[in-house]
Amino acid sequence: MHYEVWQTAAAVGTFFVITATAIAATIELRSMQARNQLHAILAVERDFREPALQESLRYVQYYLDQRMSDPQYRADLASLGFIDAREHPEMSVCNWFNQMGTLVKNGIVSPDAFLDQFSRLVDQYWKILAPVVSILRRRRGDEQYQNFEYLASLSKLWHEQHPHGVFPKAVPRMPMHDVWLAEDQA
């Protein structure tokens, strides 16, 4: 009988040790995931600030529309094969957004963290670049830049779920006064 009590006590003790180990492992895993997410979002931010990408973003915003009116420019996009990003800086922007879509889709970067920081940019550049992606897909298929499209679709859904932004409701907003409004409207 004594032996059975010790056996039961040992089993209960083992159960508690295994449970405590599992809880500690879960906590450590969450901590590692948080660190990995932090490193990933910081890497995304760092890549976004690279001068070459910033120059390509500027090109897309200010010059792409007029360049797209050139039939030869569009023909370059429609052709199969390599498209030189020196002649078509929009390709660097499409590639960056496509890579970000891949990271978000595969859970390497949290969708909420990415969209909180970049959703308006995704929306703006998808509107500008959708005609480019359409031309690229003529001969390359719908798979072309599908992760960029995924990111744009996610961003649209995110805005529907957060129509007034994501400022925490329990935190009071700071009073704002646009001191230049009257002068700028004149």
Image (tube, grey):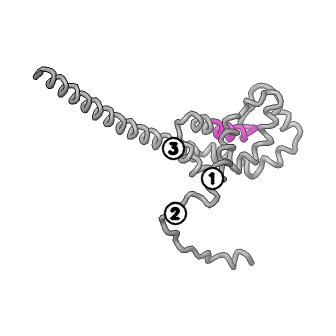
Residue in the image at 75% along x and 48% along y:
127
Dividing the picture into quarters, in which one does residue 92 lie?
top right
Q: Is residue 171 left or right of residue 145?
A: left
Q: Which disc number belongs to residue 21?
A: none
* Pointer 3 residue: 41
In this view, the residue in front, 65 or 115, is 115
Q: Amino acid at mark 3?
A: Ile
Residue in the image at 87% along x and 36% along y:
72
Q: Is residue 101 left or right of residue 27?
A: right
- Quadrant of the image containing the N terminus: top left
- Quadrant of the image containing the C terminus: bottom right
Outermost residue on the left side: it is 2
Q: Position of residue 160 (x, y in %)?
A: 66, 53
In this view, the residue in front, 107 or 74, is 107
Q: Which disc number belongs to residue 169?
A: 2
* Pointer 1 residue: 161
Q: Position of residue 25 (x, y in %)?
A: 34, 34
Q: Tell me the element at label 1.
A: helix
Residue in the image at 33% along x and 32% along y:
22
What's the magenta region?
86-98
Q: Position of residue 14 (x, y in %)?
A: 23, 27
Residue in the image at 80% along x and 26% along y:
80
Between the C-alphas of marks 3 and 1, the distance is 22 Å
Q: Is residue 115 left or right of residue 150?
A: left
Dividing the picture into quarters, in which one does residue 163 lie?
bottom right
- Residue 118 against residue 103 in the figure, above or below: below
